[in-house]
Amino acid sequence: MNGSKKIVLLTMLGVLALFGGALIYFTMEYLSSVSQGDAPPTPETIHQIGLLLLVVTMMAGIPAVGMGAYVMYIGSRIHVTGQWPPAGMGFQSKAPVMLGARANLVAFSTMGLGGILVMTGLFLPLLGWRLMNMLGE
């Protein structure tokens, strides 16, 4: 890996660590301002925590849907070209190529795993909604 890629990767890692630390700090500040020590939680507090849980599950589900769609796209490319790795995907020319039935098995497996990832991404916010409603009861 050349020097410029290392600098970019280290910069990205630093920015992600900074945003992660800021997210943890502001979440802890929010939770400490919402809770009053040993006092029982109020319905408004429970509702706010439920909404926070819903937002977090939605934020986790949206990238899963995108990744699943991309994995399904790769599976469809494998199926259309009839080979693994599919042509034009940027693999080295020395990579071993699978053709025929084995490539179709890889294609359908890849599309199935992408579908599972999409379904997981769609059902994750529903699970958060259900948990939010269970907290409110």
Image (cartoon, helix red, strand yellow):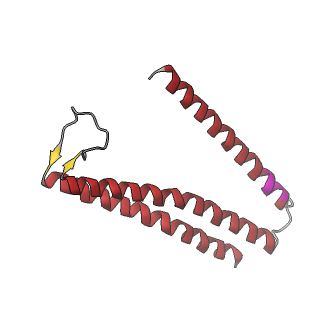
- The residue sitting at 14% across, 48% down in the picture is 99
Residue 34 position within the rendered picture, expressed as x and y whole percent measured from the top left: 83, 61
Magenta residues (range): 29-33
**On the rendered image, what quadrant is the C terminus found in?**
bottom right
Q: Is residue 94 left or right of residue 32?
A: left
Relative to 24, does residue 54 appear above or below in the rendering? below
Relative to 94, does residue 77 appear above or below in the rendering? below
Relative to 85, does residue 112 appear above or below in the rendering? below
Residue 120 position within the rendered picture, expressed as x and y whole percent measured from the top left: 46, 64
- Residue 88 lies in quadrant: top left
Residue 89 position within the rendered picture, expressed as x and y whole percent measured from the top left: 31, 43
Residue 16 position within the rendered picture, expressed as x and y whole percent measured from the top left: 62, 40
Residue closer to the observer: 123 or 135: 123
Asked if the magenta segment contains residue 86, the reply would be no
**On the rendered image, what quadrant is the N terminus found in?**
top left
- The residue sitting at 27% across, 54% down in the picture is 77
Q: Main secondary structure of the magenta part?
A: helix
- The residue sitting at 49% across, 67% down in the picture is 122
- The residue sitting at 87% across, 61% down in the picture is 36
- Residue 70 lies in quadrant: bottom left
